[in-house]
Image (cartoon, helix red, strand yellow):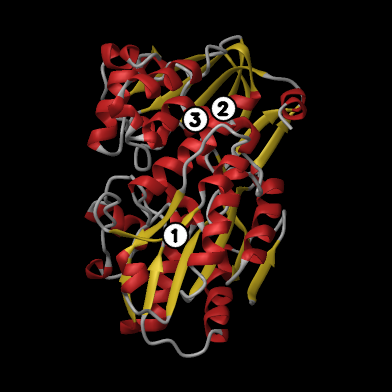
Amino acid sequence: MSLYCAAGGIDSDLSSQLKELFVESLAKLGERKRVLAIPPDISRLHSRAGDLTRFAWEYYGDRLKDVLPALGTHTPMRPEQIARMFGATPAGLFRVHNWRTDVETLGEVPAEFVFEQSEGQLNYAWPAQVNRLVSRGEFDLILSIGQVVPHEVIGMANYNKNILVGTGGRESINRSHYLGAVYGMERIMGRAENPVRSVLNYAADRFLKHLPIVYVLTVVGRKSDGQLAVRGLFIGDDAECFHRAAALSLKVNFETLDAPIRKAVVYLDPHEFHSTWLGNKAIYRTRMALADDAELIVLAPGVNRFGEDAGIDVLIRKYGYRGTPATLEAVSAHADLAADLSAAAHLIHGSSEGRFTIRYCPGHLSKEEIESVGYAFGSLQAMLARYNPQQLREGYSRVNGEDVFFIGNPGLGLWAYRDRLEHDK
């Protein structure tokens, strides 16, 4: 097992060195003839994974045979999104992962292990599923590229999740998401070790060892001027690179506040967020910082649907973001939701549990649609006029006589106030 690169720190900016560090690491791997790159999709636009994938293509040339974005259940990337994220990387290299049809099961994590990890709440086996291109493509190098950042399902994003969920199948995605939701999102976020990660580690140790996977992990944060900086780059073929990246991400991406936020405004970049499925990072990442009876205003100019997947969109519209008890009851009573546990998990994640108000201000959904799923509606034009994201700075600002906490991209961090953080340990 090897660690090929461990560079950076809380005040580092590796942005200009990224290609050099990456190429040096690739050289350590020796000659490779069939290479697969597995980066994230447009929802991780700021991860620098697009640049790293392009660097891999420039280094390997026609030995880079395929690029398989780790879509999970997300909508396939459009040509303009591929061009924006991956630059000159040839569009003909890109493959689309279909989570419903393109997978095979390599093995199973036993139900007893899942039962133990869920503290007795769930009793099902977990199938280790991957895209057939991963398992049958006969590659001599699989570059799993992505960003480590706090995550609502897995605690800290990436590492073996990129393979086992990002290129996973219906049952693996459903059951892992539901495990995280039932165990408790606030007990998981920002923690590298948790029940969902334990299940994936179990699977990776037993069913992925024969695959030539090398993990390429970035940590990205904001500088004082608001610009993004690559704080860390970690490349290796085992857990050490992930744990080092996760430790740095906690320092870079986790903001602890002394008092809860009464009013938060979160902006969703329209190039990145087109659904509440993705846009609800505004909820996941701020919930531990929000006071009881707080108001969370989500400025969502690009949001035009609820689910990334058409079937899940139907389920969100049908059952809504009603909180954990209502969702668990719906899973017990309705076969359609029980058959799509990732949707059920998402409904739990996207609810305030009645603790604070979520006011969604979408660019392309009606007031009736927003209110039908359990959110309060806000006029996007009116809210943009009142809370102009181009004028607000990150963190607290005084706006029209009120204190407002502004977040320009919820995907880059996790926020909590100290008392709640201690309470949820």
- Which residue occupies the extreme front position in the image? 112
Q: Which residue is mark 3?
A: 282
SS at mark 3? Answer: helix
- In the rendered image, the quadrant that contains the N terminus is bottom right
- In the rendered image, the quadrant that contains the C terminus is top right
Q: Which residue is mark 1?
A: 163
Check the image and report above or below for 301 versus 107. above
Q: Does any portion of residue 296 appear in the rendered image?
A: yes
Task: Judge the density around disc 3: few (<14), some (14-19), many (≥20) Cα neighbours within 10 Å.
Answer: many
Residue 50 figure quarter = bottom left
Check the image and report above or below for 147 versus 250. below
Residue 308: percent from left, percent from top? 30, 38
SS at mark 1? Answer: helix
Task: Report the mark closest to the observer, 1 or 2.
Answer: 1
**Marks 3 and 1: CB-CB under 8 Å?**
no
Separation of residues labelled 1 and 2 (CA atoms): 33 Å
Residue displayed at 48% across by 63% down: 145
Q: Which residue is mark 2?
A: 406
**Marks 3 and 2: CB-CB under 8 Å?**
no
Check the image and report above or below for 74 versus 202. above
Residue displayed at 37% across by 73% down: 36
Check the image and report above or below for 404 versus 268. above
Residue displayed at 27% across by 30% down: 313
Q: Amino acid at mark 2?
A: Phe
Task: Report the mark closest to the observer, 3 or 1.
Answer: 1
Residue 395: percent from left, percent from top? 63, 29
